[in-house]
């Protein structure tokens, strides 16, 4: 257990699993390098909101949000 897991639980949420952590960190890295750096945390926030609001399979929705974001970024 780490700080992020504790934070999630303090907010009444399930901790982020390792696969979803990797997906979110990759999104943040891509956005930071291919657009304005300040968009990195904001893009992960939006991806999380999208996943939460989609319901059924949050991990699949997260990946859909990432595909959308990376498709909108300028080429590397």
Image (spheres, rainbow, N blue to C red):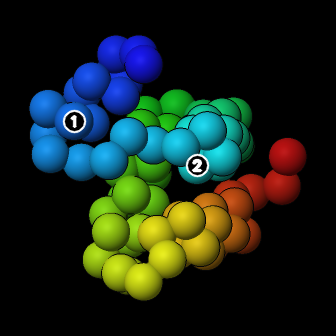
Up-down relation of residue 14 to residue 47 (above or below): above
Q: Are marks 2 and 1 in contact (CB under 8 Å)?
A: no
Q: Residues within 10 Å of mark 1 (few under 14, many from 20)?
A: few
**In x, y percent, where is residue 74?**
74, 57
In the picture of the structure, the residue carrying the numbered disc 2 is 20
Quarter holding the N terminus is top left
Query: Residue, x 58% and y 49% (percent of image)?
Result: 20
Query: Residue, x 38% and y 71% (percent of image)?
Result: 50
Work out whether residue 41 or residue 14 is closer to the camera in this orientation and state it.
Answer: 14
Position of 70 with respect to 57 (left or right) is right
Q: Which element carries disc 2, helix, strand or loop?
A: helix
Most extreme residue toward the right is 76
Up-down relation of residue 34 to residue 57 (above or below): above
In the picture of the structure, the residue carrying the numbered disc 1 is 9
Work out whether residue 47 or residue 3 is closer to the camera in this orientation and state it.
Answer: 3
**In x, y percent, where is residue 21?**
57, 39
Up-down relation of residue 22 to residue 6 (above or below): below
Compute the Cα span from label 2 to label 1.
16 Å
Q: Which element carries disc 1, helix, strand or loop?
A: helix
């Amino acid at each position: 257990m780490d700080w992020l897991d504790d934070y999630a639980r303090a907010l009444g949420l399930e901790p982020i699993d390792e696969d979803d952590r990797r997906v979110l960190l990759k999104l943040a890295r891509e956005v930071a390098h291919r657009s304005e750096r300040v968009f990195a945390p904001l893009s992960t926030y939006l991806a999380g909101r999208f996943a939460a609001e989609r319901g059924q399979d949050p991990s699949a929705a997260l990946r859909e949000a990432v595909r959308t974001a990376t498709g909108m970024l300028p080429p590397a």
